[in-house]
Amino acid sequence: MHAKSTDFKVRIVFAGTPEFSVSLLEALINAKHDIIGVYCQPDRPKGRGRVLTACPVKEKALERHLNIFQPENLKDDKTQQTLAKLNADVMVVVAYGQILPAKILSIPKYGCLNIHGSLLPRWRGAAPIQRAILAGDKTTGIGIMQMNEGLDTGDILLEKTCPITHTDTAQSLHDKLAKLGSNAIVEVLNNLDNLSPTVQSENNATYAKKLKKDESWIDWTQSAIQINQQIRAFNPYPIAQTHASSNRFDAKVLRILSASVVMANGNHNPGNIIKHNKQACIVATGDGALSLETLQLPGKKMLNIKDFSNAYTLTQLFSD
């Protein structure tokens, strides 16, 4: 990276779309760098009324009176010329949602930097936080990467590690990594001339494909540990779910937002309810058991197990 001293205010074009990007944008603003443009996805229809809705990054950019650009893509000449006229030192890209063409990568003086929520080359792609929890990883982190034409394949400029606890959900880990990433990108921008890029090893690369709703169905023949990882990885989206029967209904969809792994005594078929009283609901799995903690029925509020048990007694859980 051919950077010089950064004692000056770095001229930054920021590109991001979802909530994860917002704290990173705020960190750059608070670091007193010059945000000369914010790129984000066009407004999309949302909700039952299909109302055009701004993304979280646009909302923050409007609040801060920043210059906003929302092209459908970055491929056409006019869009690229508009970016070039901004005369940016660097483009910071955080979950933008578009592949950057090669021509874009070379427009800013110091190229384009990406903030990625994993320790690359593990979990390249769209859902690194969820895939790390789902796989049972003990550690993840944030990488600041010099972007190239590949998918998360560029040289690493700085990494920060983060443990994954046995209670972390996708939301809690998201929040930790956003804070870690905010500190990391500011550190990189303040030390552009002192960084030593590290080439990624292709031998250890894994891909974090986008989450699909059909992955949310629980297979009770899996181990309690695997199912608990699924529950944590899919909270807050798309939420792990199962079919359930109780004293008051048959075969309704039950969403499980939190649970904990417990020992199971005796032989029980996966999905069988071992115990359900006012304080706990224990369900058998293929190996061990889960104590259900937070549940939700269709059209109902999320309830802790104590409140849920005041109204329902589960009798069986079924794999899809």
Image: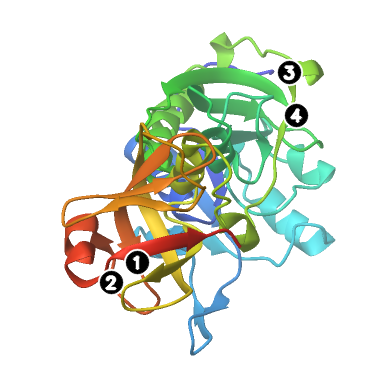
Amino acid marked by disc 3: Gln
Residue at horizontal 80 percent and vertical 17 percent from the top: 203
Residue at horizontal 67 percent and vertical 32 percent from the top: 109
Amino acid marked by disc 2: Lys
Q: Kindly identify which residue carries mark 3.
A: 200
Cα gap from disc 3 to disc 1, whole angstroms? 42 Å
Task: Evaluate if marks 3 and 4 touch, with contact meaning CB atoms under 8 Å apart.
Answer: yes
Tell me, yes or no, if residue 105 can be seen here: yes
Question: Between disc 4 and disc 2, whose residue precedes?
Answer: 4
Question: Between disc 3 and disc 1, whose residue precedes?
Answer: 3
Q: Kindly identify which residue carries mark 4.
A: 153
Question: Between disc 1 and disc 4, whose residue precedes?
Answer: 4
Task: Evaluate if marks 3 and 2 touch, with contact meaning CB atoms under 8 Å apart.
Answer: no
Question: Between disc 3 and disc 4, whose residue precedes?
Answer: 4
Q: Which label lies toward us, 1 or 4?
A: 1
Cα gap from disc 1 to disc 4, whole angstroms? 40 Å
Q: Kindly identify which residue carries mark 1.
A: 296
Q: Kindly identify which residue carries mark 2.
A: 301
Cα gap from disc 2 to disc 1, whole angstroms? 6 Å
Cα gap from disc 3 to disc 2, whole angstroms? 45 Å
233 to 119, vertically: above or below: below
Amino acid marked by disc 4: Thr
Tell me, yes or no, if residue 239 can be seen here: no
Question: Is 288 on the left or on the right of 201, as rendered?
Answer: left
Residue 132, quarter of picture? top right
Q: List x then y, in percent, for residue 170.
A: 44, 44
Q: Which label lies toward us, 4 or 2?
A: 2
Q: How many marks?
A: 4
Q: List x then y, in percent, for residue 273.
A: 38, 53
Q: Nearer the viewer, residue 229 or 280?
A: 280
